[in-house]
Image (cartoon, grey):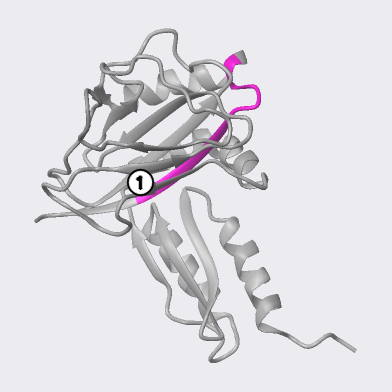
């Protein structure tokens, strides 16, 4: 006799299914007794795949997915950091990044982030991949050429205080990506230019992630939505 299908077992199955979608940040949760998939993918095909996963559930067991589609150019940073992000999610206290406030960011609004490290953090690299194919290095930066997170610490980045760097949301708007990497030593011997084409940086990042500095390294990624004021 097969065990009964429960909401929890359906949720586990959906989470396993969406975990197989690479280049995405997807969450599956129970909301009002039904499974809801939300997040961001980097291709319309993956958005269709999420829709099929939801439609395969029994009638009434799933809500309509809430999935945004970002530029395919944001896939490569996710692929490069995939092993580090997998190692991070396996930890009891993972590295995390969140915007303050949470939600869509409007033009003219400051970009403020909350970073939370793990029990074994170190040097930190925070990169903001923009919708137009660029990347801004939030940490390290000219005001803070050596950046680190203490074990188990929390840090707010981007507030207008003292001599710290801050950033303002501007055009072009859309789905953008923040990637945080912690490693035993800095990924790069000297800081990168504060802003540069993402393609050039990703080639350098690929080389850096193959080096000894990334032993035990962890990563977290966050899609954000920006819009006109």
Residue 227: quarter of image: bottom left
Q: Which residues are magenta?
A: 213-223
Q: Tell which residue pokes out farthest to the right in this image.
A: 1
The N terminus, quarter of image: bottom right
Task: Report if residue 211 is visible in the image.
Answer: no
Question: Is 188 in front, or is 123?
Answer: 123
Task: Report if residue 114 is visible in the image.
Answer: yes
Question: Is 21 in front, or is 155?
Answer: 155
- Residue at image point 16% right, 48% down: 109
Q: Tell which residue pokes out farthest to the front in this image.
A: 162
Q: Residues within 10 Å of mark 1 (few under 14, many from 20)?
A: few
Residue hosting label 1: 72
Report whether 78 appears left or right of 15.
left
Q: Secondary structure at mark 1?
A: helix
- Residue at image point 71% right, 84% down: 6
Q: Determine whether 59 is above or below 163 in the image.
A: below
- Residue at image point 42% right, 18% down: 204
Report x, y in % for residue 179. Answer: 42, 37
Report x, y in % for residue 206. Answer: 49, 23
Residue 56: quarter of image: bottom right
The C terminus, quarter of image: bottom left
Q: Determine whether 107 is above or below 206 in the image.
A: below
- Residue at image point 61% right, 70% down: 14
Report whether 180 appears left or right of 3.
left
Report x, y in % for residue 106. Answer: 16, 54
Q: Is 2 part of what is drawn in magenta?
A: no
Q: Tell which residue pokes out farthest to the top in this image.
A: 189
Q: Is 221 part of what is drawn in magenta?
A: yes
Q: Determine whether 67 is above or below 82 in the image.
A: below
Report x, y in % for residue 94. Answer: 59, 44
Report whether 166 appears left or right of 129.
left
């Amino acid at each position: 006799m097969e065990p009964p299908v429960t909401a929890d077992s359906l949720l586990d199955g959906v989470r396993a299914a969406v975990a197989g979608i690479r280049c995405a940040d997807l969450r599956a949760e129970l909301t009002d007794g039904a499974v809801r998939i939300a997040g961001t993918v980097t291709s319309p095909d993956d958005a269709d795949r999420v829709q099929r996963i939801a439609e395969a559930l029994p009638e009434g067991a799933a809500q309509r997915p809430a999935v945004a589609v970002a530029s395919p150019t944001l896939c490569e940073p996710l692929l490069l950091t995939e092993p580090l992000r997998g190692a991070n999610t396996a930890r009891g206290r993972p590295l995390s990044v969140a915007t303050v406030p949470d939600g869509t960011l409007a033009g003219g609004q400051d970009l403020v982030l909350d970073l939370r490290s793990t029990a074994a953090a170190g040097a930190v690299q925070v990169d903001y991949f923009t919708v137009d194919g660029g990347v801004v290095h939030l940490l390290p930066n000219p005001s803070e050429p050596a950046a680190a997170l203490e074990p188990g610490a929390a840090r707010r980045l981007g507030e207008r205080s003292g001599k710290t760097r801050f950033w303002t949301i501007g055009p072009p708007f859309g789905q953008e990506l923040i990637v945080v990497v912690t490693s035993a030593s800095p990924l790069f011997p000297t800081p990168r230019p504060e802003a540069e084409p993402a393609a050039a940086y990703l080639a350098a990042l690929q080389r850096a992630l193959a080096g000894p500095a990334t032993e035990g390294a962890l990563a977290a990624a966050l899609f954000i939505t920006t819009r006109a004021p």
